[in-house]
Image: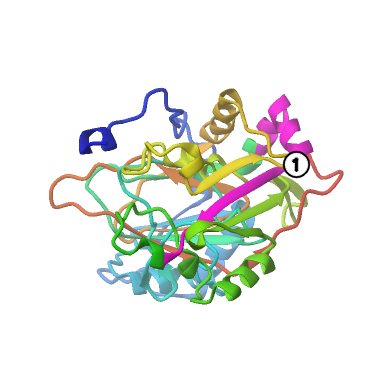
Amino acid sequence: MNTAETFAPLPDLLEPRWWTGTPALSPETFIINCNEYRTAGEPLEPSAELEARMQAMFDEVGLVYLINTGLEDLQGMRTIASQIVKNQRQYEGGANPRKPIEKNVYEVGAPLEAWLHYHHEMAYIGSSTKMVSFLAHKMPETGGFTYVSDNCQATDALLATPFGQKLKTLGLCYHRDLTDRDNFVDKLDIGVYNHWQQSFMTEDPEEAAAEAQRRGLSIEWGPDRLLKTRFYISAFEYFPHLDRNLLFSSLADDGMWFDTWPLVQHLPASERPLKLTFGDGTEMSAEEKALFLKVYDDYGIPIPWQVGDIAIICNYRFAHGRPAVHLQEGEERELGVLIGESFDRVEARDGKWQA
């Protein structure tokens, strides 16, 4: 395959719309203009007053977006986010090969040329996180937006369809293949395969297997020490804060996630590192996948980053994603990801399907 073929777009892609043009929530319900909390000309500093407002907004809405912070460094942004993201975890058990760029802050771990479907952070393991924070360190003049989607409205819309009821009945299986780092030496770095050494933070295959099983994954070793994991779980989760079941999955956990990733998009589905099926192993149809995209698109909200902006989202109440980013010469985009404390999943409960 030549280079032109490698980067050529695939035909008939299911492309997200991202949003309808009208935000699913009124901006004043989740935006904090930090000029109210700054000394003139000085960057934002932590305060009890700001912390109380952030916490109240997070508890009420599940989304906090801080603008006009005057901050330019990741350490300062992390300090502000840490006012309510008090307990932070490492990116352990994650699917992408993310690198730390500040204490407990990780890069996005995906090529800018690819769109990232709406998703919930680490939905493919038993211990996820309730909170995720994004720190805008470097941003282009235009574009580079992140979008979040109101999962309460998306859940209700999906449950009103036969596909939603099918998900409710069958559940899901997350298929994930983790390569062995030593077997990737001198091979083309395609930038998406995560090695089990990095994902489970160990050099010992027995320890990696034990950690995977501790997280509720079924495992199988393949050729070249490929670690194949399978995770069977409900498509919906009971969320105690709202006392209701919510959708907790997305097509970001399927092979189509890589349809726009350079050097990966032309791999057959069997060679892609992620796959999502119904819990009985059957595949989703193209029509079902299109509906899965639509329910998130219908309730999208743009986050139009400026340097220093900070967003904190409830990982259960909102999904997040972004379109492809096209930089001009000299531009950069670096969005730091801060992951909150572990939050053990609770499968859907009877009688908790209404808001």
Give the SS element for disc 1. loop
Most foreground residue, 326 or 149:
326
Question: Is residue 98 toward the left or the right of residue 214 in the image?
Answer: left
Question: Is residue 3 toward the left or the right of residue 304 in the image?
Answer: left
Answer above or below: position of 259 versus 37.
Answer: above
Question: Is residue 166 toward the left or the right of residue 93 in the image?
Answer: right
Q: Amino acid at mark 1?
A: Ala
Residue indicated by mark 1: 355
Q: How many labels sit on residues?
A: 1
Q: Position of residue 293 (x, y in %)?
A: 54, 32
Q: Residue at x 47, y 70 (%)?
A: 197
Q: Position of residue 292 (x, y in %)?
A: 58, 32
Q: Quadrant of the N terminus?
A: top left
Q: Position of residue 261 (x, y in %)?
A: 36, 42
Most foreground residue, 321 or 137:
321
The extreme left residue here reads 329
Q: Which residues are magenta?
A: 155-181
Most foreground residue, 173 or 79:
173
